[in-house]
Amino acid sequence: MKTIQGYDYGKVATSPVSLQELDLLKKTVLFTAEDEKYLRLAGEVLQDQTSQVLDLWYGFVGNNEHLLYYFSKDGQPNQKYLAAVRERFEQWILDLCNRPYDQEWLNYQHEIALRHHSTKKNQTDHVDAAPIIHYRYIVAFIYPITATIKSFLANKGHDAETVDKMYHAWFKAVTLTAILWTYPYVHKGEF
């Protein structure tokens, strides 16, 4: 695996969300062992397409000033920051599909949450940009990150039913991570 600036998987603090709470969240979004199977298949399908996926997602962000703002200072996007985040975002796709949702994975989701929140925003890349990604966009991004993945999942010749199962597993996994990423935004004891 190549070295990715700021990718600290396995080297971060313990999440305040317990594995039992994660299991309940998985149960709530109907995430099952079958979803795990289809998410792994999605990982195989997406393995060589992650750059194209990020091209699409970054095009979306770049064409929306209100989103590009979070990578900017005084209206000027920081290209180095965008590139560093892109590498980690690409790895996130693979981690979402391929990593077991264990304590280490849960810990890293919390680290990502902190990096979106004012707690740690900009620190990993030592940049001066917007100090927080507002909560509303963490939740709002569930849709574009889900809706845009289906065509990539269909690129390897799987039948429609298999593509649909990968798509729904992806949707559930993205929803889980977005929920976990909102942790720092919620008042203590209310998550």
Image (tube, rainbow, N blue to C red):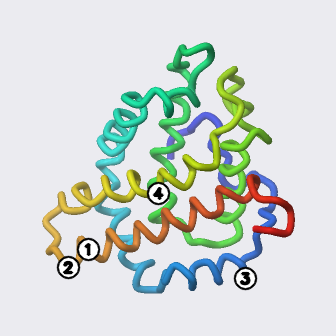
| Residue beneath the point at 40% across and 53% down | 145
Nearer to the camera, 25 or 135: 135
112 relative position to 16: left or right: left
Q: Which residue is mark 1?
A: 164
- Closest to the camera, between mark 2 and mark 4, is 4
Q: Amino acid at mark 4?
A: Ile
Name the disc covering residue 161, or none.
2
Q: Position of residue 99 (x, y in %)?
A: 53, 66
Confirm or deny contact between disc 1 and disc 2 (CB under 8 A): yes
Q: Under tag 3, what secondary structure?
A: helix
- Closest to the camera, between mark 4 and mark 1, is 4
Q: Which residue is mark 4?
A: 142
Name which of mark 3 and mark 2 comes first in the sequence: 3
Location of residue 121 by image quarter: top right
Q: Assess disc 1: are there few (<14), some (14-19) or many (≥20) residues with their C-alpha within 10 Å of its C-alpha.
A: some
Q: Under tag 4, what secondary structure?
A: helix
Nearer to the camera, 127 or 30: 30
137 relative position to 188: left or right: left
167 relative position to 161: left or right: right
Distance from Cα at disc 3 to Cα at disc 1: 28 Å
Distance from Cα at disc 4 to Cα at disc 1: 17 Å
